[in-house]
Amino acid sequence: MLNAQIIKEKARELGAVATGIGDVELFKGVDPRRDPKMILPNAKCVIGFLFRVPRALYRTMEEGKQFMQYTQLGVKYIDEDLAEIFLFKIGSMIENAGYDACLQRNISNLRIKGDHSTNPEVVDTYELAHAEAVSPNKPAPEIIMDFNFAAKVCGLGAVGDSGHLIAPGVGPFLRMAFIVTDAPLECDAPFPESLCDHCGKCKEVCPGKAIDDDGVDSWQCAVYYRGAHGTNPFMEKDFLMDDPEKEAILSGNKRFDRQSAREIYKKINFLPSKTTGYIPCICGKACDMACYRHLKEKGVL
């Protein structure tokens, strides 16, 4: 008979570094466009899976040796290849036992209506601004779960000041996938509190000053993720030569919004991205590196 332990053992065998099961009732009160019960009305739980992103992919970015490998292997491959195959295998096991399994992988470039944030990992994001509900009792599509919140409900981790999930054992070096199911599985307790101790290291190292006490400015982050900073090894001397704000941009003191960020994108296309739609991380994920080191030094990881 299918149970939580069987799923967790199979998930580890297939490559998940951690698995947690969250009670779907803990999503009560969330935006209906984030609610797993709007995906599967008779859902009983959400199963969350974490995949480790190899530390060395971050280290080679920090050392200025490689930037494409992190994006292609640590982001695109895990989200679009590994997670998909993994979800189909776990989902098949659940459905072979007679239950439904709604597979949920990260869709990096979609935003629900009204969400004006962006994702620095992709060429651009598309807000579903024209989506309308098909009936009064249904939310406007596309229903997109909040993965960070779902991970906390599943007991896997919690978000830190950098806006990224931090989990035991792997810190912020991870990707996520989920399954919404009506299988009556034993649920785990939600993650109690973030491992983040608000040390401020992520704020200090961000080249675009995208992190402050109010959270993360995703458009500011996206510009510097793409390399609009003076330490970018691909930047030529004549970059932004005629721009009166050049020094402010390179130092991270220029503030970007939704419009101005998109305007500068074509000027900071330092490495190829059009073939896959994923942007190389030229900031080297300095925030995650600082977070990981701090937590290691504290003995938390």
Image (cartoon, grey):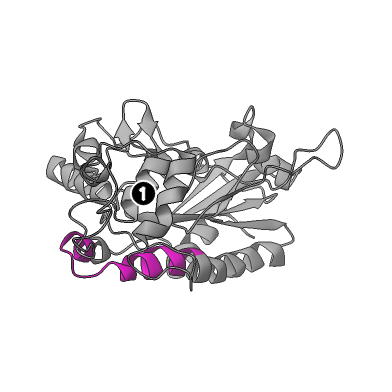
Part of the protein shown in magenta: 59-79
Secondary structure of the residue carrying tag 1 is helix
Please provide percent x and percent y for residue 46: 59, 47
Using residue 56 as the reference point, say whether residue 132 is left or right of it.
Answer: right
Q: Which residue is drawn at the image coordinates 67% and 56% (left, top)?
A: 102
Quadrant showing the N terminus: bottom right
Q: Main secondary structure of the magenta part?
A: helix
Q: Which residue is drawn at the image coordinates 21% and 58% (left, top)?
A: 232
- From what the image shows, is residue 161 above or below residue 237? above
Using residue 162 as the reference point, say whether residue 44 is left or right of it.
Answer: right
72 is within the stretch colored magenta: yes
189 is within the stretch colored magenta: no
Residue 255 seen in the current view: yes
In front: 151, or 283?
Answer: 283
- From what the image shows, is residue 113 above or below residue 109? above
Q: Amino acid at mark 1?
A: Val
Name the outermost residue toward the right.
135
In front: 298, or 284?
Answer: 284
Q: Which residue is drawn at the image coordinates 85% and 33% (left, top)?
A: 136
- From what the image shows, is residue 218 above or below residue 273? above
State the image quarter where residue 69 is shown.
bottom left
Label 1, residues with CA under 10 Å away: few <14, some 14-19, many ≥20: many
Residue 166 seen in the current view: no
